[in-house]
Image: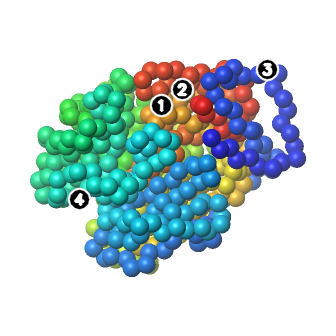
């Protein structure tokens, strides 16, 4: 586990008692002696993020974005269709390695063998070895989960093209079709325990612009529960992002789609659409999205990548915006320009993660034919924060005197993105954490009782 700390001359005042932290590793406190007015600086070129070498006009969906926290620091894998995937050390050194692998359509990653290192999933291969899938159809996205509870990791494979079904590659290597997915056009696939029963379900965000099928929620990967849960929406969608934006402890869903984006509030009765986030014009399309607390005020905001509609003019001069929608009690306001997010283009995947150790989430954004953008925050905020490292799919609750916030560890938080297994909590005016509760997928509970000084990373050993 790596903890990065800012140098500071002011030592935090000691707490009156020591937290019960037997189950957690506690990182150092990162004091903020001089909060700043939050802004971002685009630093992608200086940090070595690569531009495309020979863009392919008929392959413009992007391939994906993978970020991992390794023993050596932050590492990013990305690239462009039919070009070598690049591995970039995100430490400001601009070190870039060209891999022997290249992707046509999709790049993701997962720790398939459980050794603590991610393996790259490139189209229909795992670290270069074929997954043994039948030929035909685009492999758009892959979600890994033990769907049959046999202790072996399975892969749900979202495909599109003709009347092809989605596939499940079981842990023993057998491959079966997902009955009922023949009319679907998968674009992004998410594994999550939607009903809280300890078994993973599969949410498939489908692009119904080419096929009549709705998006889907598959219980245990095989039983269609879309209608009863509200997942049967029929938008020409690219991706979705889950989070509890309204603080009720339930997963909500943002869907990025053509012409209009959509926000759904989750609950026992299923998804219910709410208004307030659609900022698209009629000739643009939402692609990637990410929930984040950009200013650490305790409310989740939304980062949305807009891009071309149906692959029109997608050259370097395409002028779709990147939008950061700041939340104020359920009302979302675009603050992108005032924060320095001014670069337009045909954006694709977006990712939010702390990269420069100042206590503010930084942003990575890919484009269809342009160098990825890296927005680094310019300093710390008045609002405190806590980062929790925990196993994939764990539910994390953090309690302060301002209330309880809930996150889920999700290494596939949005369209074509693989991220580290961590959860970020902006704490607003709270400086001390009273309670942290982590519930793993198998029901194992870990708790930390404060008072615990904020502005630090904690994690399960």
SS for callout 2: strand
Mark nearer the N terminus (2 vs 3)? 3
Q: Residues within 10 Å of mark 2 (few under 14, many from 20)?
A: many
Q: Residue at x 69, y 20 (%)?
A: 20
Which numbered tag is attached to residue 267? none
Q: CA distance from mark 1 to mark 2?
A: 6 Å
Mark nearer the N terminus (1 vs 2)? 1
Residue 266: x %, y % from top left: 38, 33
SS for callout 4: strand
Q: Residue at x 87, y 43 (%)?
A: 10
Residue 421 in view, yes or no: yes
Location of mark 4 (residue) = 138
Which residue is nearer to you in this view: 179 or 359?
179
Q: CA distance from mark 4 to mark 3?
A: 57 Å
Location of mark 1 (residue) = 394
Which numbered tag is attached to residue 438? 2
Q: Residue at x 48, y 21 (%)?
A: 444
Q: Residue at x 47, y 55 (%)?
A: 66
SS for callout 3: loop
Cβ atoms under marks 4 and 1 closer than 8 Å = no
Which residue is nearer to you in this view: 20 or 42?
20
Mark nearer the N terminus (2 vs 4)? 4
Where, quadrant-wise, is the N terminus in this rendering?
top right
Location of mark 3 (residue) = 17
Q: CA distance from mark 2 to mark 3?
A: 22 Å
Residue 166: x %, y % from top left: 20, 47
Cβ atoms under marks 1 and 2 closer than 8 Å = yes
Residue 212 in view, yes or no: no
Q: Residues within 10 Å of mark 3 (few under 14, many from 20)?
A: few
Mark nearer the N terminus (4 vs 1)? 4
Q: Residues within 10 Å of mark 4 (few under 14, many from 20)?
A: many
Would residue 261 be found to the left or right of residue 354 on screen? left
């Amino acid at each position: 586990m790596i903890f990065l700390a800012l140098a500071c001359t002011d030592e935090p005042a000691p707490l009156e008692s020591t937290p019960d932290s037997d189950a957690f590793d506690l990182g150092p406190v990162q004091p903020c002696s001089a909060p700043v007015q939050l802004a971002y600086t685009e630093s992608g070129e200086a940090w070595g993020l690569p531009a495309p070498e020979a863009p392919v006009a008929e392959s413009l969906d992007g391939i994906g974005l993978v970020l991992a926290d390794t023993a050596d620091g932050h590492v990013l894998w990305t690239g462009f269709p039919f070009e070598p995937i690049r591995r970039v050390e995100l430490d400001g050194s601009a070190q870039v390695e060209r891999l022997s692998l290249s992707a046509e359509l999709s790049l993701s990653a997962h720790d398939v063998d459980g050794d603590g290192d991610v393996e790259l999933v490139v189209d229909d291969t795992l670290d270069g070895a074929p997954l043994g899938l039948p030929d035909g159809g685009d492999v758009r996205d892959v979600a890994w989960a033990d769907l049959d509870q046999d202790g072996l990791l399975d892969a749900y494979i979202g495909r599109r093209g003709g009347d092809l079904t989605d596939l499940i590659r079981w842990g023993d290597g057998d491959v079966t079709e997902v009955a009922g997915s023949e009319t679907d056009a998968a674009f992004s696939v998410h594994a999550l325990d939607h009903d809280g029963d300890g078994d993973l379900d599969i949410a498939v965000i489908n692009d119904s612009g080419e096929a009549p099928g709705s998006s889907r929620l598959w219980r245990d990967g095989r039983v269609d529960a879309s209608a009863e849960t509200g997942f049967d929406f029929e938008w020409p969608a690219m991706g979705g992002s889950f989070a509890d934006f309204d603080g009720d402890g339930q997963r909500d869903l943002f869907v990025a789609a053509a012409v209009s984006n959509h926000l759904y509030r989750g609950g026992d009765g299923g998804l219910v659409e709410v208004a307030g986030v659609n900022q698209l014009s009629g000739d643009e399309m939402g692609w990637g999205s990410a929930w984040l607390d950009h200013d650490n005020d305790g409310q989740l905001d939304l980062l949305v990548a807009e891009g071309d509609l149906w692959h029109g003019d997608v050259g370097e001069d395409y002028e779709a915006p990147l939008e950061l929608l700041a939340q104020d009690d359920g009302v979302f306001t675009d603050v992108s320009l005032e924060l320095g997010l001014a670069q337009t283009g045909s954006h694709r995947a977006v990712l939010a993660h702390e990269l420069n150790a100042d206590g503010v989430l930084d942003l990575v954004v890919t484009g269809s034919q342009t160098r990825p953008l890296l927005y680094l925050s310019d300093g710390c905020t008045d609002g405190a924060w806590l980062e929790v490292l925990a196993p994939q799919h764990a539910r994390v609750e953090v309690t302060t005197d301002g209330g309880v916030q809930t996150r889920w560890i999700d290494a596939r938080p949005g369209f074509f993105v693989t991220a580290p297994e961590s959860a970020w909590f902006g704490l607003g005016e709270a400086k001390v954490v009273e309670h942290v509760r982590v519930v793993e997928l198998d029901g194992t509970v870990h708790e930390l009782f404060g008072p615990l000084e904020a502005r630090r990373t904690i994690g399960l050993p």
